[in-house]
């Protein structure tokens, strides 16, 4: 009798034939393969659970100790010592000496901080005497107040074949350009009438001047700039003193080169 098609399909699904053609070998391979994947999945799942469940370590308490912490530890040691084994007198004297030394060092540190704060306040008061005085500072900024521009100067180390003075506003836009021609080595005053290239007086504000000069070989000159203005304000920002020149230019006290 012929076999039913359904029975053949069931028989085919019921066994696995290996490459050698023996029944059962394929089942062992398949069983081992499935077991390996299950193990990998199980390990990966366990690792993920452990990683997600690991608590985040955080620092508890203070990272440094002060004199109060030292005294607390010392008193706690005396309270919980064994009555039959009292604290050695030499060790106790050593700890007291360490505490005294630490106390003296911290008091010295506090006194030095107070002295520094006092010196800083005195220096700040001295800066108030610069109000309404003209000072010269390093830099190439200019302030224009009521149509009057501040003054500056620049230094050429070597003679220049051609030089041009440019003035820019606070946004970097060109306001004025002036041809200076050939120049010798030396220090020159920068004079600007506060007008733009159209002959109109510019608005009050912050400006910057720049000199571009080339020598005989066509190389650009390295120029040193200075600016001059009247101190119209003194500000203290985060312990740092700043001066305002001509109501426009802000400079640090370290930039001041000369009081005029």
Image (spheres, rainbow, N blue to C red):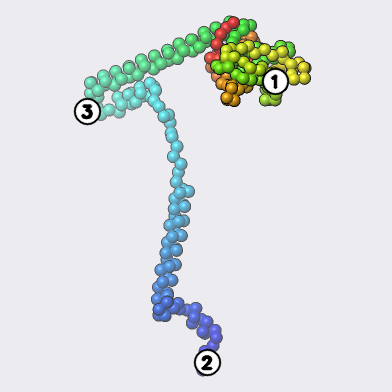
Circle count: 3
Cα gap from disc 2 to disc 1, whole angstroms = 109 Å
Label placed on residue 177: 1
**The C terminus lies in quadrant:** top right
Percent from the top left, x then y, of residue 251? 59, 16
- At label 1, counting other C-alpha atoms closer than 10 Å, the crowd grade (few under 14, some 14-19, many 20 or more) is some
**Disc number lying in front (3 or 1):** 1
Q: Which residue is drawn at 51% across and 81% down?
A: 10
Q: Residue 2 carries which label?
A: 2
Position of 53 compared to 82: left or right? Answer: right
Of residues 181 and 141, the one nearer the viewer is: 181
Badge 3 or badge 2: first in the primary sequence: 2
Q: Nearer the viewer, mark 2 or mark 1?
A: 1
Q: Earlier in the sequence, mark 2 or mark 1?
A: 2
Ranked by sequence position, the earlier of labels 3 and 1 is: 3
Q: In which quarter of the image is residue 65?
A: top left
Is 111 in front, or is 159? 159
Name the front one of labels 3 and 2. Answer: 2
Q: Mark 3 points at which residue?
A: 84
């Amino acid at each position: 009798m012929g076999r039913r098609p359904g029975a053949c399909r069931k028989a085919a699904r019921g066994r696995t034939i290996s490459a050698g053609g023996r029944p059962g070998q394929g089942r062992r391979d398949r069983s081992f393969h499935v077991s390996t994947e299950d193990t990998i999945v199980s390990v990966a799942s366990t690792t993920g659970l452990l990683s997600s469940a690991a608590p985040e370590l955080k620092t508890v308490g203070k990272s440094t100790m002060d004199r109060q912490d030292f005294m607390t530890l010392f008193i706690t040691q005396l309270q919980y010592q064994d009555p039959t084994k009292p604290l050695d007198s030499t060790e106790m004297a050593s700890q007291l000496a360490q505490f005294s030394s630490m106390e003296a060092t911290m008091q010295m540190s506090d006194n030095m901080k107070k002295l520094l704060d006092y010196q800083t306040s005195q220096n700040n008061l001295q800066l108030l005497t610069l109000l309404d005085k003209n000072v010269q500072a390093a830099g190439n900024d200019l302030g224009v107040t009521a149509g009057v521009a501040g003054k500056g100067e620049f230094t050429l180390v070597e003679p220049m074949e051609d030089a041009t003075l440019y003035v820019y506003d606070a946004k970097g836009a060109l306001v004025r350009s002036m041809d200076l021609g050939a120049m010798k080595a030396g220090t020159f005053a920068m004079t600007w009438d506060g007008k733009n290239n159209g002959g109109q007086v510019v608005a009050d504000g912050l400006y910057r001047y720049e000199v571009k000069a080339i020598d005989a070989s066509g190389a650009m000159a390295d120029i040193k700039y200075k600016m001059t203005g009247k101190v119209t304000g003194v500000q203290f920002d985060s312990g740092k003193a700043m001066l305002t020149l001509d109501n426009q230019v802000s400079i640090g006290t370290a930039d001041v080169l000369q009081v005029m």
